[in-house]
Amino acid sequence: MDQPDREPPLNAVLSRPDNSRGAARPPLREHVAQSVRRYLRDLDGCDADDVYEIVLREMEIPLFVEVLNHCEGNQSRAAAMLGIHRATLRKKLKEYGISA
């Protein structure tokens, strides 16, 4: 049965030459790039230490929360969807103080 409202898997979307889903939406990396540019601009000339860790944390927290919500709290399913081991997901959830 065809499900027209369901979006294709991310790996299928990223493998498309134009990275589109049929609509003229910018790819996720464009949103990330804009956010990073804004963050760096807001530093107002000051240097920041650990920008990589800051960005990674800011991306991982909502990613884990949203995927867990999508998987109705099922950590095994969420880990599979994320492409990481369940133990890694559990470690990250604990590190970020996210309860599942």
Image (cartoon, rainbow, N blue to C red):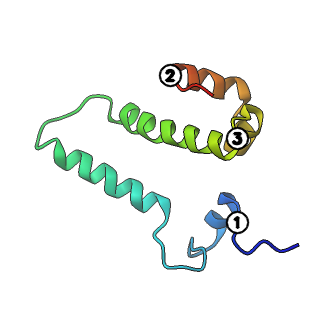
Label 2 sits on what residue type? Gly
Q: Residues within 10 Å of mark 2 (few under 14, many from 20)?
A: few
Label 3 sits on what residue type? Glu
Q: Distance of mark 1 from mark 2, alpha carbons?
A: 31 Å
Q: Position of residue 10 (x, y in %)?
A: 65, 59
Q: Distance of mark 3 from mark 1, alpha carbons?
A: 19 Å
Q: Position of residue 3 (x, y in %)?
A: 78, 71
Which residue is drawn at the image coordinates 64% and 39% (left, top)? 68
Q: Nearer the viewer, mark 3 or mark 1?
A: 3
Label 1 sits on what residue type? Pro
Helix, strand or loop for disc 2: loop
* Lower position in the chain sequence, tag 3 or tag 1: 1
User: Residue 18 occupies which quadrant of the picture?
Assistant: bottom right
Whether residues under marks 1 and 2 lie with C-beta atoms below 8 angstroms apart, the answer is no
Which residue is drawn at the image coordinates 36% and 56% (left, top)? 33
Q: How many marks?
A: 3
Residue assigned mark 3: 72
Any mark on residue 8, and which?
1
Q: Distance of mark 2 from mark 3, alpha carbons?
A: 18 Å
